[in-house]
Amino acid sequence: MVDNPIPATPVIFETELASTARKVRGVLDQISGVLDRLGWNAAACGVVELVLAEALNNIVEHAYSECPDGGIMLRMTAGPEFADLTLQDRGTAMPDYRIPAGRIVELGNRCDDLPEGGFGWYLIRTLAEDICYSRENDENRLEIRICRHTHEGIKGAQQDLR
């Protein structure tokens, strides 16, 4: 059996999805498959999946909170070294037209004190190499770059995150 060589040129993956949790889950599986074919290990794939899940869920829950059937355009340009993600939607703009600060949330001493959210932007900012947000003509555009080698050595990463 001959192994498929890893492409030297970037692979482009584009799709449009409805702003539902089910559609988000489906596209995450597709993205993981593309990165796996490019030779990304489980830890690095998991980072892309986590960052993309957080960003897409923010669109579903916040940008489209008043319109659950909104559309999201996703484009990933990925190669052996990087994954560039571009998300576009026509939902509500981010507060003050800026990416949230993403500060770590103070945790209480009891499970009942744990907040439901507040971790997403911290994770995205920590794991991404670069992030850019803009709003033009009633459209949000979020660009995220993740570098493979930054995350390949994460200890304790699951072999299969799906």
Image (spheres, rainbow, N blue to C red):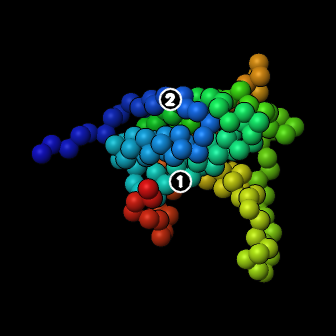
Q: Quadrant of residue 116?
A: bottom right
Q: Residues within 10 Å of mark 1 (few under 14, many from 20)?
A: many
Q: Which mark is residue 143?
A: none
Label 2 neighbour load within 10 Å: few <14, some 14-19, many 20+: few
Q: Is residue 31 above or below residue 115?
A: above
Give the residue at x 48% y 49%. Answer: 148
Residue 87 position in % (x across, y down): 62, 33
Q: Observer-nearest residue: 40 or 140?
A: 140
Most extreme residue toward the right is 96
User: Which amino acid, mark 2?
Assistant: Thr
| Residue 65 spot, x, y in % from top left | 74, 40
- State whether residue 47 appears in this view: yes
At mark 1, the secondary structure is helix
Residue at (43%, 37%) from the top-left corner? 79
What residue would you read off at disc 1? 47
The residue tagged 2 is 15
Q: Quadrant of residue 88?
A: top right
In front of the other: 121 or 151: 121
Of helix, strand and loop, which one carries label 2? strand
Identify which amino acid the numbered label 1 is placed on: Val
